Image (cartoon, rainbow, N blue to C red):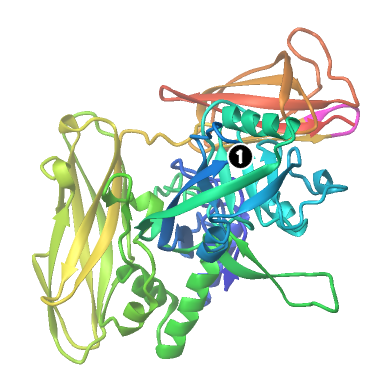
Amino acid sequence: MNLSLGNSLNDPDYATSIALDWAMAEGVVAVTSNGNSGPKNWTVGSPGTSRDAISVGATQLPYNVYNSAISTSEGIEYPSAKVQGFPSDAELLALNGKEFEFVHVGLGAPEDFEGKDVAGKIALISRGVYPFVDKASAAKAAGAVGAIIYNNIAGEHADVPGLAVPTIKTTLEDGRKLLAELENGNNKVSFNINYSKTVGETMADFSSRGPVTGTWMIKPDVSAPGVNITSTVPTHDAANPHGYAAYQGTSMASPHVAGAAALLLQAHPDWNVDDVKAALMNTAEELNNPATGKPYPHNTQGAGSIRPLAAINTDTLAAPGSHSFGTFLKTKGKQVEKQQFTIKNLSDKNKNYSFKVNMGENSKAIKVMTSNNLKVKAGKSQNVNLNVQVDAGKLVPGYYEGSITISDGSANIDVPTILFVQEPDYPRAEYVGISQLENDQFEITGYFPGGAESVEYFVYLSNSDGAPVGYLGDIGVQNNIPAGYHTFEWDGVLTNESKLQKGYYYNVYAYATYKGQTDLAGVNFLYE
């Protein structure tokens, strides 16, 4: 079962998360997208927070990087020009060494192209309001062969792999030069694009990161391709019903894993849901961040990028495929927590397994004890106990990760593990919602994962897009809020005795403070 859906709440007890736990308990392999709110930690959303389902992060497959230069009139340079994204190498290189007309289309909304001839030309577009992918798609729909998107503020904007047309990005300064060229009647641009290097499989910045609040679990569990994925789309044209487009998101990644799970069940119809999950995690390939040369954190990639053939052929399963030892709250002395996992020997020979734990530079202060050697008979399974001891006095508060390597002498399985010293740095305010009741009353609900010592509610006037326009006043302060959802009724009157007026958009915010950390959440609504 694939679920390409999500929610902004990092809540393991949210309804969809619990539903997937039940699906797994009933023997259905449930696979879900991890969310598209990365790259910060704690951004995984339900149902990616499920305790048992397979949550999936998004990777970008190996791709080529190109240098680019653009030119118009002699003597005018555009040093900021870089390739932002493209649908294929061939389409990008097709611009090379040629001269094209370019047409300014404002913000690049579909209506901005109306009445303008961009067929076979380059669309010059300003950043702002609409996503880059929508701007490029609108350019393609209007017949453009490429786009140049200039920034609307100082600095450089993001790369977006897989855009619908080859797209070059520039700074605001260089964008103004292009606009000045048009004003002077110089409407031709040429491109010089050259291969630079190839980048291996990488994690997508947008892919949501764990851990999960409360359970402190590593999420995603695994990762799979989710950038520039060709997917079917409706054409709304009976004469041309078969539509395809390139999309990005963990909703593109999770179907890859669901398909892999189906292959595993076909190859091993006697496997249960835990076997399938363990096989995918145990055989995943750890990915390195090209910017650092080091592996991505566990809460970025999970166990790594799936390798279905290796999963089908594995002869050892270690379940669960990752561990969180939770929180260690003692400020002095040593604290011990326990975990357990199961080794299943799928082969027809007895195997001896050894275990090695690596907590990096923190291995002296964090000690994980397990059996040095374990013998498992052919076709049998055996439980393994883990004890982790943390010497709080030797560690600063924070997040720590490591790996448990299980070896049968010829093959290794790496099991990711994490733990926290002192209260984790999850967002203290996760969600605010407001409902309009009868008699001009409101119901306000906040979600505070660990509770809060104090929550300050206040209101801004806003526009319909949710952008705050001006501070109006405070609703009030509430103290000693328990963990979870907190709901109260409000009469619409602020502490300065002003009252909200109907017909306007407002933002309600909550500042929550807990154990020295304060975070903000808010919601936009129309008072009708």
The chief SS type of the magenta part is: loop
Query: Which residue is rendered at x = 18% and y = 75% of the image?
Result: 411
Apparent side of residue 465 relative to residue 200 in the rendered image (left or right): right
Residue 207 visible within the image: no
x, y percent for residue 113: 81, 47
- Label 1 environment density (alpha carbons within 10 Å; few <14, some 14–19, many ≥20): many
Furthest residue to the top? 496
Apparent side of residue 413 relative to residue 176 in the rendered image (left or right): left
Residue 438 lies in the magenta-colored region: yes
Which residue range is magenta in the image? 437-442
Disc 1: which residue: 72
Is residue 268 or residue 486 the one in the foreground? Answer: 268
Query: Which residue is rendered at x = 76% and y = 41% of the image?
Result: 105
Quarter of the figure with the C terminus: top right
Q: Secondary structure at mark 1?
A: loop
Is residue 145 or residue 357 the one in the foreground? Answer: 145
x, y percent for residue 287: 32, 58
Name above or below for residue 392 compared with residue 6.
Answer: above
Is residue 399 or residue 245 the one in the foreground? Answer: 245
Is residue 443 or residue 366 the one in the foreground? Answer: 366
Residue type of the residue flagged with mark 1: Thr
Dividing the picture into quarters, in which one does residue 3 lie? bottom right
Quarter of the figure with the N terminus: bottom right
Apparent side of residue 435 relative to residue 420 in the rendered image (left or right): right
x, y percent for residue 128: 68, 35
Residue 384 lies in the magenta-colored region: no
Residue 431 visible within the image: yes
Query: Which residue is rendered at x = 24% and y = 88% of the image?
Result: 379
x, y percent for residue 230: 59, 69
Apparent side of residue 190 relative to residue 386 in the rendered image (left or right): right
Furthest residue to the front? 74
